Structures are given as C-alpha cells and as structure tokens.
Image (spheres, rainbow, N blue to C red):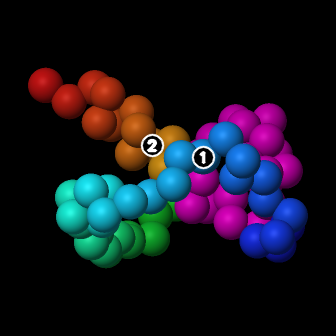
Amino acid sequence: MTDEEIDTSDSPPLGDDFFARAQWRMPGNKTAVTLSVDSEILKWFEAQGADFGQRVNAALKIYAQAHQD
C-alpha cells in the first residue's frame, strides 16, 4: 500500500503541541533465539507479511509489559 492509498481522513492533524511532546525512541538490540511454537501460530504470523518476526517480537513485548510486576 502506498502513502497515497492510506485513508487518514479520521486522523487528527499533528500540531505543534504533539511535536513539542514527541520523543525519539530507538529500537533496542535484538538477540537471535531458537524456540518452538505451535505450527498454526507460526503460520498465522507468517500470513501477516514478510516482517512476521517483527510482529512476533511486538506481541511478546506487549505481553511482557502487561505482565510486569
């Protein structure tokens, strides 16, 4: 999908206040691991697109943040 094809009609404009509060965030270092997952889970993530590894990482990050002590 190109930028022109994305419908942003329901997105509010980003004004000076937004950019005054915005923070630059760099992704953390990645570590390659080998783990076993159910084949249907892997197939679902793979069906989401070529960047499925990033999506798995994002899902794990959300889960970890939700379960912090």
Q: Quadrant of the C terminus?
A: top left
Q: Quadrant of residue 31?
A: bottom left
Label 1 neighbour load within 10 Å: few <14, some 14-19, many 20+: few
Q: Quadrant of residue 64?
A: top left
Amino acid type for the residue under numbered disc 2: Leu
Q: Which residue is mark 2?
A: 60
Residue at image position (67%, 41%) is: 10
Amino acid type for the residue under numbered disc 1: Ser
Q: Which residue is mark 1?
A: 11
Nearer to the camera, 55 or 42: 55
Q: Is residue 7 left or right of residue 53?
A: right
Residue 10, placed above or below residue 2: above
Residue at image position (78%, 52%) is: 7
Residue 22, placed above or below residue 8: below
The span picked out in magenta is 35-57
Cα–Cα span, label 1 and label 2: 28 Å
Precedes in sequence: disc 1 or disc 2: 1
Nearer to the camera, 36 or 67: 67
